[in-house]
Amino acid sequence: MLINFSLTNYKTFRERAEWSMVATDDTTFEEDNVAAVPDFGLRLLKSAAVYGANASGKSKLLQVLGLMKALVRGLRKSSPDEAFPVEPFRLNPTAAAEPSEMEIIFISAGIRYRYGFEAEATHVVAEWLFTKQPEQEAETEVFYRNEQTIELPADGGPQLRYLRDADVVRKNELLLPRAADNNSPEALQVYEWFQNLNLIVALDTRKHRHVLIGLLNDPNWAPVLLELVQAADLSIMAAEPDILDMDNLPDDVPAEAAQRMRAAVAEATKPTQIWRDVRTQHLIYDDDQSPQGHIWFGLKEEESHGTLQFFTLMALILDTLQTGGVLAVDELETALHPQLVRKIVSLFHSPIYNLRGAQLLFNTHDTNLLAADSPFRRDQIWFTEKDRFGGAKLYSLADFELPTPMHPGQPVRFDHLERDYLNGRFGAVPFLGRFGYADTTTDKSPSSDGQ
């Protein structure tokens, strides 16, 4: 489970920003919204949401997670002369000349990991990995990299010693993916944790189609997916993978591709099926609005783009619940009804569906989640706001537990939370000036005296 992650001097964040999933002493919704980790004396939140004005830094938080995943998983290959993909805060010359820093702390397979790096466009300045067993008081160093010098403990693993002695890690790449490629056990755990991090910034339905098909083939999760689809009121009664008939392939499959597909199936050591698409079932009605059977549509070719995206999003949500990973979504409410957003949040809070400690992180403008019946605790609600110098800061509603300076003697109340947020009590809202249109309400005709 994610404990926290932080960034410093990256894009709009000049000062250190830390997004923590550690629960406060508040016991609201304790059973549903909090997962206990007794081995480390922790209580971790199952979800967290960030509010803020446009361009206040909300999306940058999720982009950092995506960048770390791409770098750790080796998804972003670099050439020897390519710039390292960090961008410092550029509205201050001192910050612009300093490195960016990112760090993440999580628990995987009963061990606490702390991994991070500091980098400039030209090179990695520092990189570190520490672990902590439940019975340990202090962390154990796996490696610490200072520029191109790799420091290892006396009992450091042979995979890391090889990388250090062979001097094969370039200055513009991270050590960790190299160590994972060489089967370093600790590096592999970090690598695999990021594998279970699903990030949705711009949803690519093609990239995640295999996740959707896998869930539709799962008898435990397919009904849950269908329930979400029906809750969205898409008029879809059922959905299932559309299996290619190898003896009657569609005309649009090229001959060479068809030959390769048939050969792959013939050479397989176990029964193999190739999925062409997902198909969805709709009811047919006669002129008297009486049902007359059903018809199947191709999800990719005949449903709307919004329906395709919805299916993919729901599949990623259920996949995260299934694996116990982390799902980070940019603007979760996009194209979703507020009740569906609540349904999604409730799945992560559910002790029935969320058995493996899956976590949901997202940013949003949906203030319905701040209403009197909010599904959140105070420590699950976060804000981003820019100061007058262009720097963003991240802070929690839990910081407002005591009466605020602007409202002495008035503690934060959940039944007024949505109103107070929109009124700017917690910041993180836009201050809108006059738009540039002509004022047609004022009589601008010449006065009677000609002046």
Image (tube, rainbow, N blue to C red):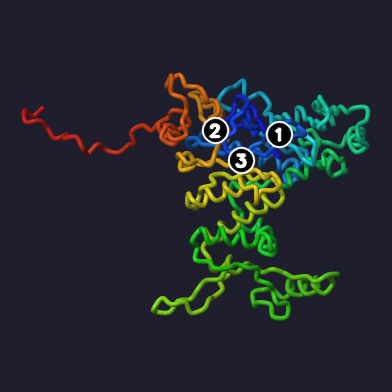
Closer to viewer: mark 1 or mark 3: 3
Reading the image, the residue beneath label 2 is: 378
**Image x and y of residue 228, in percent:** 56, 58
Reading the image, the residue beneath label 3 is: 33
Which part of the image, by quadrant, shows the C terminus?
Answer: top left
Mark 1 vs mark 3, CA separation in Å: 22 Å
Closer to viewer: mark 1 or mark 2: 2
Say the numbered circle drawn on residue 104: 1
Q: Are marks 1 and 2 in contact (CB under 8 Å)?
A: no
* Vertical side of 308 occupied by 90: above or below: above
User: Along the polypeptide, which appears first: circle 1 or circle 2?
Assistant: 1
* Vertical side of 141 occupied by 215: above or below: below
Front residue of 84 and 45: 45
Q: Amino acid at mark 1?
A: Ile
Which part of the image, by quadrant, shows the N terminus?
Answer: top right
Q: Amino acid at mark 3?
A: Asn
The reply, left or right, for residue 436 in relation to residue 18 is left
Taking the image as drawn, is residue 63 in sight?
A: no
Q: Secondary structure at mark 2?
A: helix
Quarter of the image where one finds residue 247: bottom right
Instruction: Please give the name of the residue rendered at 69% of the width and 68% of the height, measured from the top-left corner.
Output: 275
Q: Secondary structure at mark 1?
A: strand
Mark 2 vs mark 3, CA separation in Å: 11 Å
Mark 1 vs mark 2, CA separation in Å: 23 Å
Q: Secondary structure at mark 3?
A: helix
Instruction: Please give the name of the residue rendered at 72% of the width and 33% of the height, measured from the top-left corner.
Output: 105
**Image x and y of residue 283, in percent:** 50, 73
User: Along the polypeptide, which appears first: circle 2 or circle 3?
Assistant: 3
